[in-house]
Every structure is written in structure tokens, then in C-alpha cells.
Image (cartoon, rainbow, N blue to C red):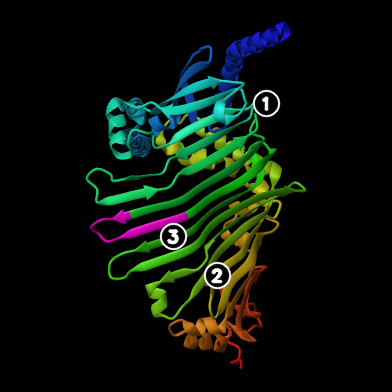
């Protein structure tokens, strides 16, 4: 019995003392997290922080500044002053050229006009973090700490938000800090119905939840989010909007610097909008998918956007059953090492102070000017994977590849003609003729395209193959004139081929 009592006392002491020691560790982890955040998002800076330690709980208050170095130069007054100064400089230079020699001193005084502009205050916001010390974090499991984050608002703003959303905060932000330094940040908005003040709209939604997990140094991350339903009703306008089954799912792994390989999938199960006069549009399976993959010193990136079945009164009136819409593109052969430098350049641009607003373009495009030529050296490819639609009668797509092969720095300084010879494009338009015939004047247009040689029949499909290589353009193998660049090569006829059966 004595041994049991001793064990119980030791356990109680550990549970009582451990949170204080873990709290000290939690403070270090939170400071590390802030440093990582500012490094990842350089447009944010920490202007003030305060940490109040406790035994079981602590509090951290952090004030951030967003785009602080830029907002001073981009304020309307600063922009106007910069443009006035630029105009004044041009006029002064012209005056100096025309002025007699004895006016040099007066001209020098006029070169830089005085400005009295006062910089505007940068955007600042304050976050209060309530830190529960581990190792036991209640329903959040085990870890170093659980952090509940709240945006600090003035009393008037807080009351206005409460009038709309009710006493419970509209968005809860909670972070579980793991033992190894990584963690999971969860964004949650409990379902509710609201009617904004002076509004004739009622908004209802089911609980939204988004969890973002990450390793200590952000070498890995994963995203998992769901929003089952959002509904908006116009009480007097007779409008109704419903969105169901929104999901977000993705993960990534650091390749080098801020370049990640990974996937992200954003999709919406269904969107329905209805209004007066039986107006109704229904869209299924809206999606946006992106992928990045690095292999053998090169990175490929792709994006797939589109929807599934679309129902609308205007389509039904034409007898069209639209089953799918696709916009799928990709970029291949991006030199990974150079791409990392471009990304680093854009990040550094946010942290670079601007002397005046007219420097914005120079600063933002500097990474592309510096490293863009190196990217082009490796013959990157822009790929149209699939752009088109699917209907009940058939489908129609555009597919192809556009490359810039063998470009050198001198090409960009020699005018457009030097680059045109380096462009290679191979585009195919492939359409079901039955689908074309469903469109207004579709049959007439298809027949005219075939007769002119811009399309050829292959079974029940119409094909148009467009090739641009070595400065020459062909359509279905027939040389074509390029507006502004002359006609077909010597010896070739630009006339249309004979009609095809």
C-alpha cells in the first residue's frame, strides 16, 4: 500500500509540475513558429510581441504589420508625388538643355522638387494566443501545447460582429503543437443561420472545418477541409443559392528552398442558383486540381479546372446537354534550381523597401529578368492537355504543345522576329461533327470549314491540325499566310485545297 501511495504522489507531482516545464518549451516553439511564418511570408513582420507565462496556461500577444515597407510608397499621395516628380524631372531636363550656361545653378535646384507627402499608416493587426500547456491537451490529445488564436478587435467592431454571427466567434483557430515541433492548425466555423443587419438575405451553413498539418520546418504539409453546405436565400428577390460538398485535400513535400512537390484538390459537389421566371442554373462537380512534380533536375506543373454536368434554361432551349467542361494545362521542363531562385527572388521583393511607387514593376519583375533567360535555356513546354466540352452528342477538344527552343539572350534584344523562329507549336482541334450540328448554324459552319481546308473529316469527327515551326504556319499540312509576317514560302500556293467529301 505504501508503494502505491508513493507512485500516486509521484504521478500527481509530475502532472502538476510537468505543465510548467512544458510551458517553457511551448514558448520556444511558438517563437520558432513566428520566425518560420515571417520567413515564409516576408510581407508580414512582427512589430511587437508579449508573452505572459503561467503554470498551466500562458498568453502570447503578437502585433503584425502587413506590407509595411510597401504601403508607404504605394499610398495614393505617395504615388501622386512620385508621378509629379517624374514629370518634373523630364520637364527640368528639357529646360536644362535649352537654358543658357549661366542658368546651371537654377536648373540644379529644380531637378529634385520638394515633396511634402506624409506616409500612410501600414496595415497592422493583433492576435492573442491562449496557450494550454501539455503534455495532456484534453480532446486534442497529447502534445507540447494547444493554442487558441483570437483576433484582437476594438469594442465597437466586436459588437457589430456579434450582432451578425451571435455570441460565439464565427471562426475558431486552434493549433496543436506536437512533441517534434510540427503541428496542426484547424480552422472551424460552427454551422448557423444569420441575417445581416439591414439585409434581405438569409445565410445558412453547416460546420466548416479545415485542418493544415505541417512538420517543424515546413518540409512537409497536408491539407484536409470540408464544408458540407452553404445556402443563401433572398427573401424578397426570390433568389436561392445552394452549394454542397466543398472539399479541400492536398499534401506536399519540400524539394528545395520553397519549391514543393505535391497535389491539391479543391472541389464542389453541386452549385444551384435559382431566381425569378423559372431561371435556374445547376452545376455539378466543379473542380480545381494542381500538381507539381520534380524529376531529373526539372519540374512539371499542371492545373485542371472544370465542371461536370451543367443544366441551364438557355442550354435546354438549344437542345444541348452539357456533360463536362475542361480547362487542363501544364508547364514542363522548368529547371528546378532556377525555379527556386525565381521563387526566392519574389519573396525577397516583398521585403525590399521602395523609394517610390514607380519602382514596383522593377522590383516585382526583377526575378524574372534575372533568371528568366536561364529557364528558357532548357526549352520549357507549355502544354494544352485538354480544353473542351462533352455533350450528349459527343465531345470537342483542343490539345497541343508550344515550346520556345534554343532561345538565347540576344534573341530578346533583336526584336520579335528573332524569337518567332524559335517558337514551335503543334495544336490539334478534334470535334465530333454530331456535336457541332447541334449548335446554331453548326452544320453550315462545319461544311464551310471543310471546304476551305481548315478542317478535314475523319469518320464522324472534324480535325484541324495547326503547326508553326521555323517561322512557317500550316493548317492540315497547307502553308498559310501570317498577318504581318508575309505569305507562304516561295513555290507554295495559299489557295484553299479542293473540297473534301
Secondary structure under badge 3?
strand
Label ID, residue 275: none
Tell me residue 308's x, y (percent).
52, 66
Of badges 2 and 3, nearer the viewer stands 3
Closer to the camera in the image, 9 or 340: 9
Q: Is residue 188 above or below residue 427?
A: above
Tell me residue 500's x, y (percent).
61, 91
Of badges 1 and 2, nearer the viewer stands 1
Query: What residue does disc 1 label?
Result: 180
The residues bearing labels 1 and 2 have C-alpha atoms spaced at a distance of 47 Å
Residues packed near mark 3 inside 10 Å, few (<14), some (14 to 19) or many (20 plus) = many
Q: Quadrant of the N terminus?
A: top right
Q: Is residue 18 above or below residue 484?
A: above
Residues packed near mark 2 inside 10 Å, few (<14), some (14 to 19) or many (20 plus) = some
Residue at position x 70%, y 11% in the image: 4
- Nearer the N terminus, badge 2 or badge 3? 3
Tell me residue 155's x, y (percent).
29, 26
Query: What residue does disc 2 label?
Result: 388
- Nearer the N terminus, badge 1 or badge 2? 1
Residues packed near mark 1 inside 10 Å, few (<14), some (14 to 19) or many (20 plus) = few
Query: What residue does disc 3 label?
Result: 271
Q: Quadrant of residue 252?
A: top right
**What segment carries the magenta color?**
233-244
- Nearer the N terminus, badge 1 or badge 3? 1
The residues bearing labels 1 and 3 have C-alpha atoms spaced at a distance of 42 Å
Secondary structure under badge 2?
strand
Tell me residue 180's x, y (percent).
67, 26
Closer to the camera in the image, 448 or 207: 207
Q: Quadrant of residue 253?
A: top right
Amino acid at each position: 500500500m505504501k508503494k502505491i501511495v508513493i507512485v500516486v504522489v509521484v504521478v500527481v507531482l509530475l502532472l502538476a509540475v510537468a505543465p510548467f516545464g512544458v510551458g517553457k518549451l511551448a514558448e520556444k516553439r511558438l517563437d520558432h513558429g513566428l520566425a518560420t511564418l515571417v520567413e515564409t511570408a516576408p510581407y508580414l513582420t512582427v512589430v511587437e510581441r508579449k508573452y505572459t507565462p503561467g503554470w498551466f496556461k500562458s498568453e502570447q500577444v503578437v502585433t503584425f504589420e502587413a506590407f509595411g515597407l510597401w504601403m508607404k510608397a504605394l499610398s495614393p499621395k505617395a504615388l501622386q508625388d512620385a508621378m509629379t516628380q517624374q514629370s518634373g524631372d523630364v520637364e527640368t531636363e528639357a529646360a536644362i538643355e535649352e537654358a543658357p550656361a549661366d542658368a546651371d545653378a537654377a536648373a540644379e535646384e529644380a531637378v529634385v522638387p520638394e515633396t511634402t507627402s506624409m506616409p500612410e499608416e501600414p496595415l497592422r493587426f493583433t492576435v492573442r494566443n491562449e496557450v494550454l500547456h501539455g503534455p495532456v491537451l484534453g480532446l486534442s490529445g497529447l502534445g507540447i501545447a494547444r493554442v487558441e488564436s483570437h483576433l484582437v478587435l476594438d469594442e465597437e467592431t466586436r459588437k457589430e460582429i456579434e450582432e451578425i454571427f451571435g455570441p460565439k466567434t464565427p471562426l475558431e483557430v486552434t493549433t496543436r503543437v506536437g512533441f517534434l515541433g510540427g503541428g496542426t492548425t484547424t480552422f472551424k466555423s460552427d454551422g448557423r443561420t444569420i441575417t445581416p443587419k439591414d439585409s434581405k438575405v438569409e445565410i445558412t451553413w453547416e460546420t466548416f472545418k479545415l485542418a493544415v498539418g505541417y512538420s517543424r520546418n515546413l518540409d512537409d504539409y497536408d491539407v484536409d477541409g470540408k464544408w458540407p453546405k452553404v445556402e443563401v436565400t433572398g427573401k424578397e428577390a426570390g433568389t436561392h443559392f445552394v452549394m454542397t460538398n466543398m472539399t479541400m485535400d492536398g499534401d506536399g513535400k519540400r524539394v528545395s528552398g520553397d519549391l514543393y512537390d505535391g497535389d491539391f484538390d479543391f472541389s464542389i459537389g453541386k452549385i444551384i442558383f435559382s431566381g425569378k421566371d423559372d431561371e435556374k442554373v445547376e452545376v455539378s462537380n466543379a473542380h480545381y486540381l494542381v500538381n507539381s512534380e520534380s524529376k531529373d533536375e526539372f519540374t512539371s506543373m499542371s492545373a485542371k479546372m472544370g465542371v461536370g454536368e451543367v443544366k441551364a434554361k438557355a442550354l435546354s432551349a438549344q437542345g444541348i446537354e452539357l456533360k463536362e467542361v475542361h480547362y487542363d494545362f501544364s508547364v514542363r521542363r522548368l529547371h528546378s534550381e532556377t525555379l527556386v531562385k525565381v521563387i526566392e527572388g519574389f519573396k525577397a521583393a516583398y521585403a525590399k523597401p521602395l523609394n517610390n511607387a514607380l519602382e514596383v514593376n522593377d522590383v516585382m519583375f526583377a526575378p524574372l529578368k534575372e533568371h528568366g533567360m536561364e529557364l528558357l535555356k532548357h526549352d520549357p513546354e507549355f502544354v494544352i492537355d485538354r480544353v473542351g466540352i462533352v455533350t450528349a452528342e459527343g465531345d470537342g477538344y483542343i490539345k497541343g504543345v508550344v515550346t520556345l527552343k534554343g532561345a538565347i539572350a540576344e534573341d530578346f534584344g533583336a526584336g520579335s522576329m528573332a524569337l518567332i523562329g524559335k517558337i514551335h507549336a503543334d495544336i490539334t482541334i478534334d470535334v465530333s461533327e454530331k456535336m457541332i450540328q447541334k449548335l446554331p448554324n453548326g452544320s453550315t459552319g462545319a461544311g464551310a470549314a471543310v471546304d476551305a481546308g481548315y478542317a478535314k473529316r475523319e469518320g464522324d469527327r472534324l480535325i484541324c491540325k495547326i503547326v508553326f515551326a521555323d517561322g512557317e504556319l500550316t493548317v492540315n499540312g497547307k502553308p498559310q499566310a501570317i498577318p504581318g509576317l508575309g505569305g507562304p514560302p516561295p513555290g507554295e500556293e495559299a489557295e484553299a485545297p479542293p473540297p473534301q467529301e
